[in-house]
Image (spheres, rainbow, N blue to C red):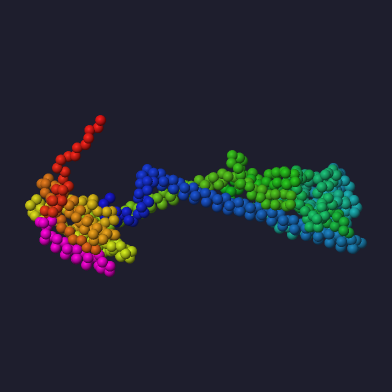
Amino acid sequence: MSKAEQHILKNKTSKWHTEHILCGNNIIRRCLVIFFNLLILVIIVGFSLRQEINETRLYVEANLNQIKKTVDSLAYRNKRYAKTATKSIADFDKNNKQLQVLAEIHYYPKLKEFGFNRGIYPNNLFNGSLIGPGFPNQLIQKDTYLFAVLDELWAEQQVHPIMYNYYYISHALKYFYLSSKLSVDKFNTTKEFFSTDLYRSQRSESQPLNELQKGMYYTSPYLDFFSQEMVVTIKSPVYSNNKIVGDIGVDIPVKSLIQSITLPKTLKSSLNFYLYVIDKKQKIEIYNGYSNRLLPTIPVHTHLNKNTLLFADISPWFFVNFAIKITILGFSLLIILNYMNAVLKRHKFQKQRYQLEAYTDLLTGLFNRRVMDTIIKGIVTENNKNGQPTAVIIFDANDFKIINDTYGHDIGDLALKHISSTINDMTRDSDICIRLGGDEFCVVLPNADLEQALIMADRLELAIFSGFFCHYNIKISISTGCTVIEKKESLHNALVRADKILYKNKKNKDENKKALQQQLNNYIVKSPPTFPKQE
């Protein structure tokens, strides 16, 4: 790299980038580029994947909370129904003499049950179904007024995506009043139900006092005695004279819980929903979206109630697919960015080459006059600010016209190249070598005083005169003029002063040539040195 290239190209690039072994070696540099591209790709994919996992977890958790909110809405409505039923029973007790039977209760010999609205006696106007084992107790006739109240309450039911069924169970008279009309084949109770452990454990009288004070409680998921489905029941006690006489409950099939939310198809197929009963350590499946168990799942949960957790396991393959898409997108983006970077580098390099050509002499490779107002002006200003001197050597070739006229312009060009190459070899990297025009040259020496400039000028004169530059065995000498740029002095004025010194020295060129020849003779070794023989 020539001094002109160093000043224009190298100064625009960091020294570490151009000289460090990691960037100087082409193979290592390419490996580093590949490594950093892969590192960026890993960071992009990792950050995007982390964001996607967090957002998906929050989204699934919001859906689980929506299920809980739907169930809670049924629970609080059930509590209100129980309070209304309790108040109605108290009002019936005050007006007991005025009450009449509102419906006839039948006995079904084949079923060994009593009730109404089971498809056998269709003339009954109640909306629900009454079911009880054995013969009906006459006291049940008074409860027909309660059935009318319950019909009005249950008629308020809002449309929910999940399936549910309200009912009233009388503990004293052993019967069910269901919120809908059911045929015999859909609901068939027996005497055994009211003697089962399931009935005893779920009735309000078996619950802790703090649960009863809340007005409602959740049962753990259990296998329903009649439907043989896993259900969760929410119950609220009904009182008469401060004693629990029955419960109003709502049965929610476990598998219908998933119907209260709407999920994207791709996400839903990557989820498994299930209930987890804490005290029993029991897992109850709600919905299975996938069955692959090769990778660990990502669990999300919320409390359905105090003893039951609602879980959703997210399949890791959902995020693997996302990571593949992001990797492809990131890889494509890196290809585009690397291509754009290569184009920008090529454009920058071309711009620097054009700048180099604009500031460089085509024949000698030295700077031309254009650097006077750019690079040199900046160096002089910086040195003046730091109190450092800047020396200037200006010189031209002696009898250059004679060489051109005698041997031709090709030999003259070789002479100019000889001078320029000698200058490049003899000066420092920080020195700026300029061809002013024709056979006139200039060297700017930053941080050099006049004495150092004179020494450099002598060395240049001797080195140029001592070399042969063509097959004619001719030599060329130069005349020099040295000066130091003074503070607040323009470069032009310093060059004019150096030029005057040059022409003053040029008048004594013959004497200078003899002196150079004498100095050259002193460097010539007339006989080769002898060395002692090695034994």
Q: Nearer the viewer, residue 139 or 506?
A: 506
Q: Does residue 488 belong to the magenta stretch?
A: yes
**Magenta stretch: dominant SS?**
helix
Q: Nearer the viewer, residue 367 or 192?
A: 367
* Residue sitting nearer the eye, 386 or 2: 386
Q: Is residue 440 magenta?
A: no
Residue sitting nearer the eye, 521 or 421: 521
Q: Position of residue 37 (x, y in %)?
A: 44, 48
- Location of the C terminus by quadrant is top left
Q: Is 460 displayed left or right of 403 in the figure?
A: right
Residue 227 in sight here: no
Where 329 sits versus 436, above or below?
Answer: above
Q: Residue at x 22, y 55 (%)?
A: 456
Residue 149 falls in image quadrant: bottom right
Magenta highlight range: 485-512
Q: Identify the residue at the far left of this view.
A: 406
Residue 293 x, y percent position in the rendering: 61, 40
Horizontal relation, residue 292 to residue 19: left or right? right
Q: Residue at x 26, y 56 (%)?
A: 431
Query: In the image, 69: left or right of 15?
Result: right
Seen at 14% across and 61% down, the residue is 505
Please say whether residue 390 is visible from this viewpoint.
Answer: yes
Q: Where residue 486 sits in the image (x, y, percent)?
A: 26, 66
Residue 163, horizontal then vertical, whole percent: 71, 51
Residue at 91%, 52% in the rendered image: 138
Q: Is residue 466 above or below residue 503?
A: above
